[in-house]
Amino acid sequence: MEQKKFYQLIQNQLEQCNYYKNINFKPTIKEEKEYWELEIEQQGFFVLKSNGWFDDAHICVNFHINVPVALALHRHDFFEIIYVYQGEIKNQVDGNLIEMHQGDICLLNANAIHQISKIEGETIVLNILIEKSLFENAFFYVLNGNELIFNFFANSLYKKNQEQNYMLFPLMMYQHTDALEMLQKIIAESFTKQSNYQTATELTIILLFLELTRAYRSYQERESARELNGPDISQIVQYIGEHYQDVTVESTAKQFNYHPNSLSRILKKYTGSTFSDIIQKFRINAAKDYLEHTTMSIDEIVSLVGYANKSYFYRIFREETGMSPAEFRKK
């Protein structure tokens, strides 16, 4: 979408919702108590439910304004993309302070506890809310294999603990991709509500995630190659994937001339995962493939993908997929 047209669309929407009038909205004491203050007193944050946000659509776009539910510490039962269209904000997520500038994107999962600083001046922030059911029903199969985004959503859906409940994409990371075009198309479709706009936003958000993943991987490769002064991180991960049945951190470190401790640190820094987590992912993916496309017994598959302990495999498989191997094969 042309930037001039998109800018005009944003301005028109701001006027319709009285954005600058509501930017310093002050609720009554009754409203504060009734809707969120009690929950904060009891648990330190309140939960923002999806009820009333989505209506007949699975994606909702709105402006962030200075209202209590936006400024107080809270989490959602849906996913959220925060997009700083103009200006800058501070976004606190799970106790981490993130400074976001114009063009930056932050993806929050449903476990993230966060609050955004008060909007000042002419700063404009948009929130794209994504219902959980959209990912469960449609994204699972489309994004499977696109590990960066897929794992982020899947871990949240299956209540799996993860160290970081957000992903930050600075403008400089993705500006040479089509991500911005995809993001603005979602916003435009949601605001104009032309025919079949729900389908358009759902398809476009998948493309947005694909673009962001490509941008992130490219960034990882550039930064890791510069630090390592040799192979980039994707080459190391590829090696692990090719030898997942019996590879160790020691054998991988020897292959790339690193100390095992250094290799572990590098992997964690650039992938967000430990060496064990990476191997686990490759093994579980292989097991899923064997379950889907062969008639081998589960015992055979357990051994083939590199697990010596069957019980351990069953536990990890359920954590990763939300079902047992037998249930996965039947689905």
Image: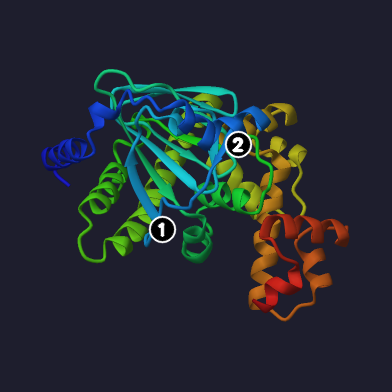
The answer to whether 328 appears left or right of 103 in the picture is: right
Q: Return the residue at label 1.
A: 58
- Most extreme residue toward the bottom is 295
Snapshot quadrant of residue 199: bottom left
Snapshot quadrant of residue 242: bottom right
Q: Earlier in the sequence, mark 1 or mark 2?
A: 1
* Residue 315 shows in this picture: yes
Residue in view at x 48 percent, y 53 percent: 51
Task: Tell me how the rendering is colored.
Answer: rainbow
- Dot 2: what SS? loop
Q: Please, what is the three-letter code of the amino acid marked with disc 2? A: Gly
Q: Please, what is the three-letter code of the amino acid marked with disc 1? A: His
* Residue 143 shows in this picture: no
| Residue 228 in the image, given as x and y percentages of width and height | 55, 27
Say few, some or many: other residues with alpha carbon within 10 Å of mark 1 (under 14 / 14 to 19 / 20 or more): some
Q: CA distance from mark 1 to mark 2?
A: 29 Å
Residue in view at x 26 percent, y 66 percent: 196
Nearest to the eye among marks 1 and 2: give it. 1
- Most extreme residue toward the top is 121
Q: Nearer the viewer, residue 14 or 86?
A: 14
| Residue 21 in the image, given as x and y percentages of width and height | 24, 27
Disc marking residue 320: none
| Residue 37 in the image, given as x and y percentages of width and height | 56, 30
Residue in view at x 68 percent, y 39 percent: 255
Disc marking residue 272: 2
| Residue 184 in the image, given as x and y percentages of width and height | 26, 45
- Dot 1: what SS? loop
